[in-house]
Image (spheres, rainbow, N blue to C red):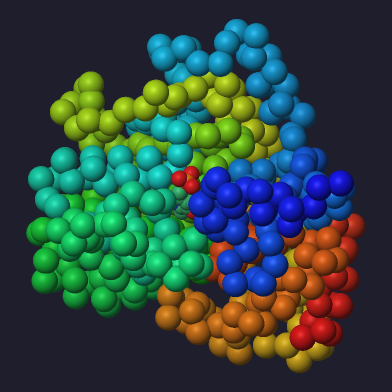
Amino acid sequence: MTTSAELFDLASRHIPGGVNSPVRAFKGLHRPPVFMERAQGAYLFDVEGKRYVDYVGSWGPMITGHADQDVLAAVRARLDNGLSFGTPTAVETTMAELICEMIPSMEMVRMTSSGTEATMSAIRLARGSTGRDKIVKFEGNYHGHSDSLLVKAGSGALTHGEPSSPGVPAALAEHTVTLSYNDPEGVEACFAEIGEQIACIIVEPVAGNMNCIPPQPGFLETLRRVCDEHGSILIFDEVMTGFRVALGGAQAHYGITPDLTCLGKIVGGGMPVGAFGGKREIMQNISPMGPIYQAGTLSGNPLAMAAGITLLGKLRTPGFHDALSQRVETLCHGLQERADAARVAMMTQSAGGMFGVFFTSQRRVDNFAQATACDPEAFRRFFGAMLDQGVYLAPSAFEAGFMSSAHSAEDIQFTLDAAEKAFSLM
Ligand code: KE4
């Protein structure tokens, strides 16, 4: 039988770091990444047949569990028609209509093949529409790996200690202004000084790439107000929060309407899909309707559309998100009880179907500085002990966890029992 360690050795010969995305590499965890063979519902199964209760869910898409039979059936039904045409297809219109219905701030939408493409395109659209070059992002927010956004980024860039990547020209990076998350005063001061130069603010309305950090009251409201006051475009990066924090995304949950929204992950049902959209008056500037170019060979791929449409349809079941949030609350409350009993300095934060585990005595973590002050060694020990017991958490202290409707009460109890043992070993 081939082990994960053997497969990782083989992978590392021809794939940089042995992975096709850095955060999968188990950096700093002193163990090789686990190679998975298959997945079903709440479970991953590795190449040696070991089962894991999975809280990564392919980094968010698997909100109804892995290998959702309805989603697979929708893809199977189109397979024999062919995989990709490079022409318009009616199913793309169905997807566009569904997105615009579910997220009313999106009057028009363009599909892409990743979240990175969606955010990259959205900031180009903001720059082209306003004639301004500067953009504002927040330290620890990750919006994919396009050049302007790989400045003080989160997720794998943070995990691997490169929040600002080499290779991004200084002449470009200087147009990216990075502020502190949950710091409305900092935003006010920045806009007072250079607001007329700022094309857009792009923000994770719940930060999920420096662990899980919800917005504090007033933060998103401030972003909305300063953009209105200075003619800047407010972009919500809902690649992670879209359809997860609430059916209509974080914008529905917090009641703040952005000008543009970026989507990914869930919208593709596990297939490579991203999207950006918003006000018609802005989106009409996108080629071929307007002059701002944006394109993609596989954008709107019919199989991917079928997967995404089917998954989104399942989320409209009444009570879906309430039940998902209840599962998260049960898990987080149970973890807190067990950590306290074992006198382990740990706390959790959550928003809808996403959550974070912080090894810290801080009562709350609101920003990058506080997130990076948590105990990485404690996280490493906890992660390893949970993995050994068959619970798969995000392999980084700077990632969020994702619940699915496939996680049963027994799965959550299994997780809590494993956590009790893990805390006792710390
Ligand atoms: P993709 O290009 O990976 O589809 O999306 C980029 C992206 C954009 N915006 C937000 C808020 C995101 O969370 C992401 C991607 N998330 C990471 C996990 N934190 C993807 C995992 C990975 O890089 O392998």
Left/right placement of residue 214 relative to residue 377 reads: left
Q: Quadrant of residue 167?
A: bottom left
Work out whether residue 147 or residue 40 is closer to the camera in this orientation and state it. Answer: 147
Determine if residue 221 is in view.
no
- Measuring 59% from the left and 80% from the top, which residue is drawn there? 376
Left/right placement of residue 294 relative to residue 16 reads: left
Horizontal and vertical percent for residue 175? 18, 59
Q: Quadrant of the C terminus?
A: bottom right
Q: In which quarter of the image is residue 67?
A: top right
- Measuring 23% from the left and 21% from the top, which residue is drawn there? 288
Determine if residue 67 is in view.
yes
Horizontal and vertical percent for residue 126? 22, 45
* Location of residue 131 with respect to 271 vertically, above or below: below
Q: Residue furthest top?
A: 81
Work out whether residue 72 or residue 198 is closer to the camera in this orientation and state it. Answer: 72
Work out whether residue 401 or residue 8 is closer to the camera in this orientation and state it. Answer: 8
* Location of residue 143 with respect to 369 vertically, above or below: above
Horizontal and vertical percent for residue 38? 77, 40
- Measuring 65% from the left and 9% from the top, which residue is drawn there? 80
